[in-house]
Image (cartoon, helix red, strand yellow):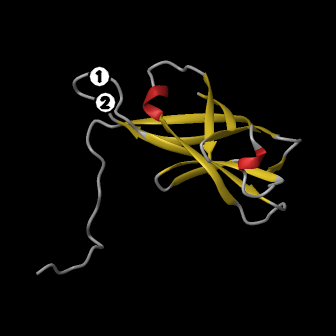
Amino acid sequence: MFKGGWKNLRLTPKPGGLKYHFTVTVHDVEILDPSVMPTAYKYLMVVWNRGARVSETKEIEGQGNTFSWEQRLSMLCTMYRDEETGSFQYKKAKFVIKGSESSGGKHQSICSCKIDLAKYAGPEDVERRVEMQFEGKGRQFARLAVTIH
């Protein structure tokens, strides 16, 4: 019988991991089809998460269908190499667009998009501009433009 509870259990990372610091500059969100949005949100924010790690922009009020930030977010991830190919293993992260009807109000998730961080990890510093397409009700709903450093 197991005694002592879970307090002595420690999860340790696999050996050979490389700590990688990702920085993302969030440029803007353009709402391509406002009819897909469940509510006419005046304020949006972008949330970047990987498991329990969360990094988010401040909420801003949009100008028409465009919301612009130019805000940097950062996250530390442990990357592992594939022994056969030498490239980094798949590492999922998610970007979520959240909306609110009033400043400081409760934010509702509108849509999300998953990316593979392994595509953006490398030995040299490279900036890559990425445009993510979000869909809702089977139509192109929004475009998020970011630069991954």
- The residue pinned by badge 2 equals 81
Give the residue type at disc 2.
Arg
Q: Nearer the viewer, residue 133 or 57?
A: 133
Q: Is residue 143 above or below residue 55?
A: above
Q: Is 90 positioned to the left or the right of 55 in the image?
A: left
- Label 2 sits on a secondary structure element that is loop
State which quadrant residue 33 falls in. Answer: top right
Residue 135, percent from left and from top: 61, 42
Q: Position of residue 37 (x, y in %)?
A: 72, 51
Quarter of the rendering containing residue 144: top right
Q: Residues within 10 Å of mark 2 (few under 14, many from 20)?
A: some
Q: Which mark is residue 103?
A: none
Count of residue discs: 2
The image quarter in which residue 127 lies: top right
Q: Please name the residue shown 49% across and 18% down the image.
A: 124
Confirm or deny contact between disc 2 and disc 1 (CB under 8 A). Answer: yes
Residue in the picture at 22% in, 24% down: 84
Residue depicted at 27% across the width and 29% down the height: 82
Q: Residues within 10 Å of mark 1 (few under 14, many from 20)?
A: few
Q: Is residue 93 above or below residue 42?
A: above
Tell me the amino acid under the disc marked 1.
Gly
Q: Which residue is mark 1?
A: 86
**Residue 58, can we see it?**
no
Q: Is residue 63 left or right of residue 114?
A: right
Residue 28 at what x, y percent from top left? 75, 36
Q: Quadrant of the C terminus?
A: top right
Q: CA distance from mark 2 to mark 1?
A: 6 Å
Question: Which quadrant would the N terminus be assigned to in this image?
Answer: bottom left
| Pointer 2 or 1: first along the chain | 2
